[in-house]
Image (tube, rainbow, N blue to C red):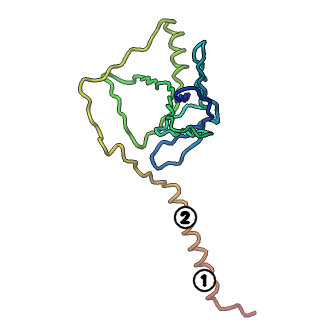
């Protein structure tokens, strides 16, 4: 989501704050506001506020709108403007190619696609366009629901360092006990 717009019926001017969260049990995060949204009708026609751009694009699922002043029984309508994602494939190897989606462990990363496309257009001409990709007639399920469960990663380096620390502590304790058991030197 890149922008937010709020509408109430009739003439109004209300200050709003917008919050969102990804999961049902997540905490609400501030996204925009407070900003003034208004709608005023007159003889010349209706005037209304422009949509509020968000400071950055947000991919959250749950949104909450909070008015700065009571709005009575009127129900606000929140409209969120979004920019659709662009999916670009860089084919490597022999076709046919497959796209796998739905991993709980994969993270979205930014790719330098605009720079790549610009370089290819310089090489192949300004009118060059990437080849279109189409969905197969019958999708194939690979890992199913198990791909959506987050797998716990074992941090072997951390475990090894903790093991060395414990072994070192045991060695120092053993040396200390052996020194305490030795009879004092007579001299």
Q: Position of residue 151 (x, y in %)?
A: 40, 49
Tell me: residue 104, above or below residue 40: below
* Residue at image point 61% right, 27% down: 38
Position of 69 with respect to 121 (left or right) is right
Among numbered discs 2 and 1, the one appearing first in the sequence:
2
Residue furthest to the left: 138
The front one of 84 and 185 is: 84
Image quarter in which the C terminus is found: bottom right
* Residue at image point 32% right, 20% down: 134
The front one of 148 and 129 is: 148
Query: Is label 2 in a helix, a strand or a loop?
Result: helix
**Disc 1 residue crowd, few under 14, some 14–19, many 20+, Cα 10 Å:** few
Residue furthest to the right: 187
Mark number, residue 164: 2
* Residue at image point 48% right, 55% down: 156
Mark number, residue 81: none
């Amino acid at each position: 989501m890149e922008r937010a717009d709020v509408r109430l019926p009739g003439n109004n001017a209300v200050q709003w704050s917008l919050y969102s969260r990804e999961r049902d049990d997540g905490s609400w995060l501030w996204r925009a506001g407070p900003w003034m949204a208004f709608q005023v009708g007159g003889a010349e026609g209706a005037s209304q506020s422009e949509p509020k751009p968000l400071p950055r694009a947000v991919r959250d699922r749950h949104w909450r709108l909070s008015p700065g002043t009571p709005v009575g029984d009127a129900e606000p309508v929140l409209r969120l403007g979004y920019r659709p994602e662009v999916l670009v494939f860089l084919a490597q190897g022999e076709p046919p190619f497959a796209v796998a989606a739905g991993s709980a462990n994969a993270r979205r990363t930014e790719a330098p696609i605009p720079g790549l496309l610009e370089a290819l257009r310089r090489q192949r001409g300004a009118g060059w366009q990437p080849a279109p990709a189409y969905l197969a007639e019958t999708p194939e399920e690979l890992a199913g629901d198990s791909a959506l469960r987050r797998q716990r990663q074992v941090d072997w380096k951390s475990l090894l360092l903790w093991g060395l620390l414990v072994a070192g502590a045991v060695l120092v304790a053993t040396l200390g006990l052996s020194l305490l058991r030795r009879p004092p030197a007579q001299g």
